Amino acid sequence: MDFELIIGLVATVMALGIPLYAIKRTSDANDSKRQLKHVKEQQELEKMRQENFLLENKHMELELEKIKNDRKLRDEIKLEREDRWLIEDKDRK
């Protein structure tokens, strides 16, 4: 009787164990697919961040160049005004 009980338990464990193992493997495969998809999304996001960073740097470079040109123009205008006033002051004397 003990021998038949052991055979029955082994058969039951095998009958339940194989589907449970298959379910676990399927779950692990799905997890791997999700993780791979997540990694790909992270790579795409990082690529977009880098492109955005480059665009922002180019924009900032253009803004800086514009500020430099504006400052140079403003300084030239300021010098012209100072020279003009100096000339007028000389003419008044």
Image (cartoon, grey):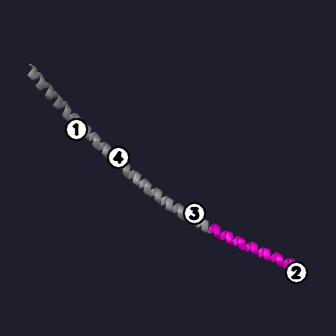
Q: Nearer the viewer, mark 3 or mark 1?
A: 3
Q: How far apart are marks 4 and 1 (CA)?
A: 20 Å
N-term mark: 2 or 3: 3
Q: Which amino acid does label 3 sit on?
A: Met
SS label for mark 3: helix
Query: Which residue is labeled 2 in the image?
Result: 91
Query: Which residue is labeled 3 in the image?
Result: 60
Q: In this view, does 22 lie above or below 51?
A: above
Residue 66 vs residue 93: left or right? left
Q: Is residue 51 above or below residue 86?
A: above
SS label for mark 2: helix
- 82 or 32, which lies in front? 82
Q: Distance between the residues labelled 2 and 4?
A: 83 Å
Label 4: few (<14), some (14–19) or many (≥20) C-alpha neighbours in 10 Å:
few
Query: Which residue is labeled 1 in the image?
Result: 22
N-term mark: 4 or 3: 4
Query: Which residue is labeled 4 in the image?
Result: 35
Q: Which residue is drawn at 85% across and 78% down?
A: 88
Residue 93 vs residue 64: left or right? right
- Is the magenta region chiefly helix, strand or loop? helix
Q: How far apart are marks 4 and 3 (CA)?
A: 37 Å
Where does the C terminus fall, quadrant-wise? Answer: bottom right
Q: Which residue is drawn at 40% across and 54% down?
A: 43
Q: Are marks 4 and 3 in contact (CB under 8 Å)?
A: no
Give the residues drawn in magenta, as a range: 66-91
**Residue 73 lies in quadrant:** bottom right
From this viewpoint, which residue is outermost toward the bottom?
Answer: 91
Where does the N terminus fall, quadrant-wise? Answer: top left
N-term mark: 4 or 1: 1
